[in-house]
Image: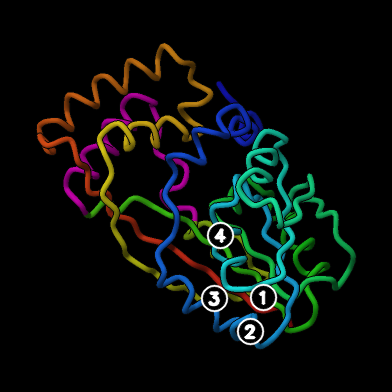
Amino acid sequence: MTTHLSRAHSFSTAATRYAAHRPSYPPALSTPLERLGGPPPRRRTAWVDVGAGTGIGTALLAERGADVLAVEPGSGMAREFRRALPRVPVVLGDGNALPLADGSADFLTYAQAWHWTDPARSVPEALRVLRPGGALAVWWNIQDHATPWADAQAARIARFLGKDDEARHTADRTSEQTTELDFRRDRLRWTRRVTLDDHLSNLATHSAFLVLGEDRTATFLNEERAELRKVFPDGIVEEAYVVDLLVATRP
C-alpha cells in the first residue's frame, strides 16, 4: 500500500505533465478572493501560496497584482514553477512547518494542496503566520460528478484503484476537522473543453496513478479511452468542475 506521504511527493516526478494538463481555475474565483482585502493594486498585501505546485493557482494571484511568495515542498514542482513564473519567488517548504516569520502574511492560500497537510500542525502554523484579521483560503477543483459520464468514470476509477478518489470530499473533511477556524464556503461551477488525450493525461497526473506505475496506469487509460469514445466520438471532452472554496479569518 502506498502512503499519504509517497502520494504527496509523487507530483515532482511529473511536474512538466502536471503543468501542461491540469486545469486552471475560472475567472469567477477572483470575486470571492477580492473580498479578502480588495484588489491588490489598491492595497499592497502579503500573499503566501502554499503547496504552489507549478504555479497554476499562484498565477491567478500574481495576475491581479498581488505580492506573492510561493511555498512548495517538491523540488521538481518548484523547478517547473520557476520556469512558468520567473518573477515570483518560491521557497521549499510545506504547510506543516512554514518557513515564514510570525505575523508575516495577510493571506495564506492553498490551491489543491490543503489535504496534503496535517491539520493538527498546519492550522497552528496558519494562525502563527497570519496577521490579526488575515485570512486562510483553501480550494479544490473537483470534477462535477453530477455529470453522468463523470460519475460513471469516477466509479470505474474507484473499482480499478479499489478506493474512492481522495479529493472528492476534501472540503467537507476540512470543515469538520478544522475546528479552530470558522470557514465560510463558496462553490463555483465551470467547464472546459479539451481533447480526449489531454483529459486522459490530466488523469495520469493524479497521485493515485503516479504511484501506481506506468504499466498499470496505461492499462486503465487504454480502457478508459475506449469508454469515453462512446460518449465523445469527436474526441473532445467537456469537463465540468466545481471549485470548492473555504475561507476563514484569523481573529
Look at the image and give the residue range highlighted in magenta: 147-170
Residue type highlighted by circle 3: Leu
Q: What element carries label 3?
A: helix
Query: Residue 102, how many percent across, how many down?
Result: 89, 68
| Residue 210 circle label | none
Q: Image height check: is 158 above or below 250?
A: above
Query: Residue 114, how many percent across, how many down?
Result: 61, 54
Residue type highlighted by circle 2: Gly
For image coordinates 10% across by 32% down, the residue present is: 230
For image coordinates 55% across by 29% down, the residue present is: 14
| Residue 37 circle label | 2
What residue does disc 1 label?
135
Decide: few, some or many residues near mark 4? Use Cα within 10 Å; few <14, some 14-19, many ≥20.
Answer: some
Decide: few, some or many residues near mark 2? Use Cα within 10 Å; few <14, some 14-19, many ≥20.
Answer: some
For image coordinates 19% across by 41% down, the residue present is: 236
Q: Nearer the viewer, residue 50 or 86?
A: 86
Which mark is first along the chain, 3 or 1?
3
Q: Nearer the viewer, residue 81 or 186?
A: 81
Q: How far apart are marks 4 and 3 (CA)?
A: 19 Å
Query: Image check: 135 left or right of 213?
Result: right
Q: Image height check: is 37 above or below 82?
A: below
Q: Are marks 2 and 4 in contact (CB under 8 Å)?
A: no
Q: Do the residues labelled 1 and 3 touch (CB within 8 Å)?
A: no
Q: How far apart are marks 1 and 3 (CA)?
A: 10 Å
Q: Image height check: is 101 above or below 157?
A: below
Q: How far apart are marks 2 and 4 (CA)?
A: 23 Å
Which mark is first along the chain, 3 or 4?
3
What residue does disc 3 label?
33
**Quarter of the figure with the N terminus:** top right
Q: Distance between the residues labelled 2 and 3?
A: 8 Å
